[in-house]
Amino acid sequence: MPCFLLFTNLQASAIPKGFLMETSTVIAKAIRKPEIYVTVRIHPDQMMSHGGTTDPCANSELQSIGNMGNEENIQMSKEISEFLQQKLGIDPKRNYIKFTNMKPLEVGFDGTTFEVLWK
């Protein structure tokens, strides 16, 4: 159930064609889960500043059930930051990534929760 949210002050027109689906693939690989469960939400055109400027920046969050811990998060931070720099030109120092490790009972899917589905 990984969900990646990206908020950026870049205009929608600056988001490259195919970026949404490329991001889905990158997140699935980084979190080590099947892409069929990955959700990506891109929020361009945000009124944002970072570090006292309105230069290109982002704020992102990766939510998942498991596959998160300090070492995993460090690796994912590196992979996601490099991807955003390559595709959007966002300096890794201008994006915070919040990692949220959710409990199966906190995530609903198909009329139930993953807590029930995984029993």
Image (cartoon, rainbow, N blue to C red):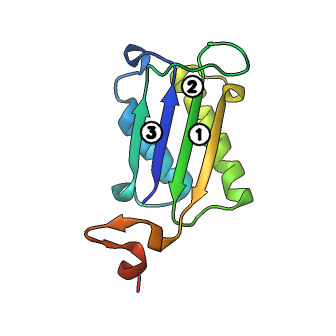
Q: CA distance from mark 2 to mark 1?
A: 10 Å
The residue under the point 41% across, 86% down is 119
User: Which sits earlier in the primary sequence, circle 2 or circle 1?
Assistant: 1
Kindly indicate the quadrant of the structure image that contains residue 107: bottom left
| Neighbourhood count class around disc 3 (C-alpha, 10 Å): few under 14, some 14–19, many 20 upward | many
- The relative height of residue 71 versus residue 49 in the rendered view (above or below) is below
Amino acid carrying mark 3 in the image: Thr
Residue 118 horizontal/vertical position (percent): 41, 81
Query: Which numbered circle lies on residue 23?
Result: 3
Amino acid carrying mark 2 in the image: Gln
Q: CA distance from mark 3 to mark 1?
A: 9 Å
Q: Quadrant of the N terminus?
A: bottom left
User: Which sits earlier in the primary sequence, circle 3 or circle 1?
Assistant: 3
| Neighbourhood count class around disc 1 (C-alpha, 10 Å): few under 14, some 14–19, many 20 upward | many
Residue holding disc 1: 80
Residue holding disc 2: 86
- The relative height of residue 17 versus residue 96 in the rendered view (above or below) is above
Q: CA distance from mark 3 to mark 2?
A: 12 Å
